[in-house]
Amino acid sequence: MTGFIIVALGGAFGSMLRYAISLIPYRGAFPVLTLITNVCGAVLIGYIAGTAAEKHLSDNLVLFLKTGICGGFTTFSTFSLEAYNLIGQGRYGQAGVYVVLSTGLCLLGVWCGMLLARVS
């Protein structure tokens, strides 16, 4: 039961952070804020995973950070819906760029987070 509470608390914090980013005034058609959120979330989860491996963080702290905060913060389901909607609108080029950037930059973000964990 403790694990559920830990995840819920982290998830609430991550969700609030995600909501805060969504309040940034941006009027473009390209889903930049979701892209930024996913890349930041990838760096964060990479850093947490790297730090946990190097510094042997407690299981509860890792659960709070990775599953809770990162799970509440990242928006892969929103990304998927937005890519689907771009395709549905016939904006195939934008959809392709969005999918490639999101995937590539998030993989790069995890790698950067792991590097950051090693030097901190």
Image (cartoon, rainbow, N blue to C red):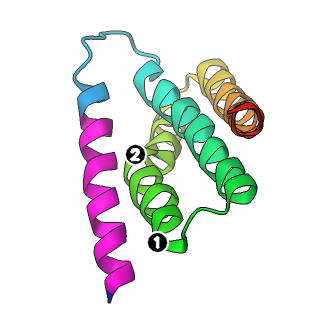
Location of the C terminus by quadrant is top right
Which residue type does callout 1 highlight?
A: Asn
Query: Residue 3, relative to residue 83: is it above or below?
Result: below
Mark 2: secondary structure: helix
User: Is residue 77 visible in this depiction of the protein?
Assistant: yes
**Residue at 33 percent of width and 58 percent of height:** 11
Q: Quadrant of the N terminus?
A: bottom left
Q: Which residues are magenta?
A: 2-19
In the image, is 45 to the left or to the right of 27?
Answer: right
**Where is residue 78 drawn, in percent x and y?**
43, 44
> What is the distance, in whole Å, between disc 2 and disc 1 at their CAs?
18 Å
In the depicted view, which residue is nearer to us: 67 or 36?
Answer: 67
Q: Is 16 colored magenta in this rendering?
A: yes
Residue 46 drawn above or below residue 2: above
Q: Which mark is residue 73?
A: 2
Q: Nearer the viewer, residue 92 or 82?
A: 82
**Residue 83, picture quadrant:** top right
Main SS class of the magenta portion in the image: helix
